[in-house]
Amino acid sequence: MLSLDYRLAPEHRFPAGLEDAKAALSWIFQTIAPDVPVAVAGDSAGGNLSAVLAQWVQAQGMRPLSAQLLYYPALSGPFVPPSREAYAEGYMLTAELLYWYCGQTLSSPEQLFDPAFSPLLANNFKNLPPAMIVTAGFDPLRGEGELYARCLNDVGVAVRLKNFPRMIHGFLNGYALFRDGRQALREGGAFLREAFAKETGGAL
C-alpha cells in the first residue's frame, strides 16, 4: 500500500492536487509488474480524488484499476442532496464549512461543474472498477455517496454501499475510540483483498 502526498489548497488550487494524484498513479503503473493489481482508496477529499482517478483511468484507456474504495467521499459539487440540508449543522462537518472549503480550493465558481472536481457530474459511469462506498449516518456528504452508488449500479458496475448510521463525517480518524471506525477499516480491507484475489486467481 502506498500513501501519497499532493499539493494542498489554498496555496495550490484545483486542479493541482489532482494532477499530483494522476502523476503518482501513472508512476505506479509504470513501475509495478503488469500482473500486480492496483486500486485507489481515500476518505473525504481523498475519496473525491479516488473517484476522479477511476474515471480518468477509464476515459484514458489506461490499465484498468481493480477497485475503488471511497470513505464518505465528496462527489456532487453544486448539486445539494437532502443529506447536506438535513445534517447542515451540529455534526462537526457543516454545510457552511463545505462551502468554505470549496472557496479555498477552487479559483472560480464554474469549476464546481467540472467532473474532475464533481465526479457525480460525469457523462459516463460505465466500465468503472468495482466500488465500495462507505457513508456515515450523520454526515452532510452521505447522500453524495448514495447517489454515486446508484449511478454505478445503474450501468452495471459492482458496488457495495455500507452505511454506519451512528457515525459522523471523518469517523475513521477515531478508529481507536469507535468500534465502527475499526469495522469500516476491516470491511474496506476485506473488499480490497477480495478484488485483488479476483485479479490474481486467489494468489494474494
Image (cartoon, rainbow, N blue to C red):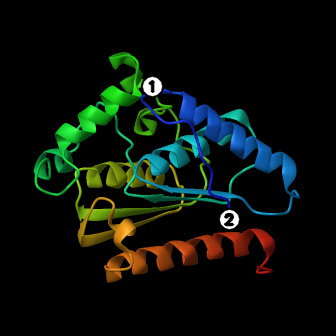
Q: Amino acid at mark 1?
A: Asp
Up/down of 137 relative to 203, above or below: above
Nearest the camera: 130 or 75? Answer: 75
Up/down of 197 relative to 97, above or below: below
Residue under pointer 2: 1
The N terminus is located in which quarter? bottom right
Up/down of 165 relative to 74, above or below: below
Q: Secondary structure at mark 2?
A: loop
Any part of residue 79 in sight = no
Nearest the camera: 193 or 26? Answer: 26
Residue in view at x 56 percent, y 75 percent: 189
Residue under pointer 1: 114
- Across and down, in percent, residue 27 comes to 78, 44
- Across and down, in percent, residue 57 comes to 67, 41
Residue in view at x 23 percent, y 38 percent: 80
Residue in view at x 34 percent, y 83 percent: 179
Nearest the camera: 131 or 158? Answer: 131
